[in-house]
Image: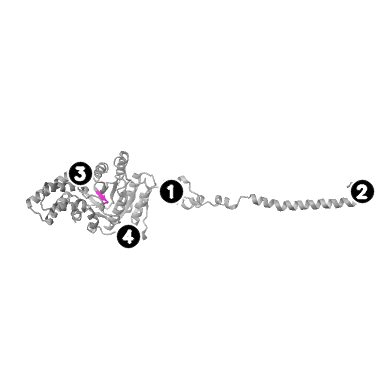
Amino acid sequence: MAQLVSAGWDTDRVLPIILIIVAILLIAAAATVALVLPRARRGRAVPPTQTAPTQTAPSLTAPNQTAPADTAPGDIAPAATAPTQTAAPEAAVAEPAQLEVPEPTAGRLHRLRARLARSQNVLGRGLLAVLARDKLDDDAWDEVEEALLSADVGLASTTEIVGRLRSRTQVLGTKDPAQLRELLAEELTTALRPELDRTLHTKRASGEPAVVLVVGVNGTGKTTTCGKLARVLVADGNTVLLGAADTFRAAAADQLQTWGARVGADTVRGPEGGDPASVAFDTVRIGRETGVDAVLIDTAGRLHTKVGLMDELGKVKRVIERHGPIDETLLVLDATTGQNGLIQARVFTEVAEVTGVVLTKLDGSAKGGIVISVQRELGVPVKLVGLGEGADDLAPFDPAQFVDALLG
C-alpha cells in the first residue's frame, strides 16, 4: 500500500479496488465449493439397490399368504402356530380331475403270468427238467429236493412234497412229462394250502367302515402296496379312506396321498413327526363320519428287531380298537428276502395279529417257495402278491394259478 501511495496512487481510489478484488475471489471460492461438495457426497452414498431387499423381502410377507383361516385379515401368523406344526390330522381331498379307472381284480394273476414266469428257472423249470429224465433214481430225487430248498420252500415242506411225489410216481409208474407235470402241480398246490381263507375283509355287514392295518419293515414296498390296495378296493366298487400314520417320513404321506388322489380316495395325515396313533385314530373317526366302505392305514416302516418301535405299533393297534376291531392286518414282505421274511413275519404276528400276507417283488429274482414257507410256519394265508411296478400289478393270490404260472 505504501508502495502504491509512493508511486502516486491515491489511497481513496486504491481501497475500493482491493475490496472488489477480494469480493470476486470469495464469490469464486464459494461457487467452487458449491459445485464440488455435492459430487463428493453423491460418490459416498449407498446405492439404493443394496438397501431395497430389506424393505421388500418376500419372506417377511409370506405368512400373510399362508395364515390359518382363523387369523384376522392382514395379521401375520406367528411361526409357532403355523398350521403344519399344530394342525390336527385332516383329510386331504383328492382331486377329481385326476381320477383313474383301475383294472378289474378278477384275472389279474392270469394276465400277469408272463411276469410271474420269470421265477421258473428257480422252482419250475428246474423241477420239470429233473422229472423228465428217463430214470428217476436217488440222485434225481436229491436234485428235486435241492431245487425246492433253494427256492425257499423250507425243509419240512420240501420233505413232504418230495415224499408224496416220489410215492405217487412209483405207484403210477409214469414217465410221461405231461403226467409228471400234473403230479408236481398237484403237490405244490396242496403245499400252498388252498383251503385257507384268502378273502380280504374290507366290508362290514353293519355298514361301518372295515379297518385294514398295513405293517412291514422298511424297503418292502409297504406304502406303495397300501396305495395299490386302495386301487384294488376301488376296482371292486368300494369307497376308501387312506390314513398316513407314517409320520416320521414326510415323503411317505405325500406318496400315499398321491396314490389316493389318482382314484378319488382322500388321505388323512398329521404333522410331520406327530403321533402315529393319533393319525390312525382320526382316520377311523373320519371314515365313520363320511361312511366309506374301508379305511386303509399305512404305518411307519420298522425293523422287527427294534423292540421300542414294535411296542409303538402295538399302541397304534390298541388306539384304533377304541373304535372297534381291526378287520385286516396285512404284513408286507419282500419275496426276495427269503427265509429272513419268516423271522419278520413271526415278530409282527405276535405284535399285530397278522391276518394276511402281501408278497411284493415276486416278478423278479424272488423264489416262489417263500409262499409255502410263510403259510406253513404261521398259518397265515398269502392274500396278495405284487408282480411289477405298474399301478395295477397287485393281484389276489390264487394257489392253482400261481403254480400254473410257475411251471409254465
- Label 1 element class: helix
Per the image, the residue denoted by label 2 is 6
Give the magenta-colored segment's residue range.
Answer: 357-361
Per the image, the residue denoted by label 3 is 377
Per the image, the residue denoted by label 4 is 100
Per the image, the residue denoted by label 1 is 83
Identify which amino acid the numbered label 3 is placed on.
Answer: Glu
Which of the two discs, 4 and 1, sits closer to the camera?
4
Dominant SS of magenta comes to strand
Indicate whether residue 365 is drawn in magenta: no
Q: Earlier in the sequence, mark 4 or mark 3?
A: 4
Tell how many labels: 4
Mark 2–mark 4 distance (CA, rounded to whole Å): 118 Å
Identify which amino acid the numbered label 1 is placed on.
Answer: Pro
Q: Position of residue 10 (x, y in %)?
A: 91, 51
Identify which amino acid the numbered label 4 is placed on.
Answer: Glu
Q: Residue at x 16, y 49 (%)?
A: 191
- Label 3 element class: helix
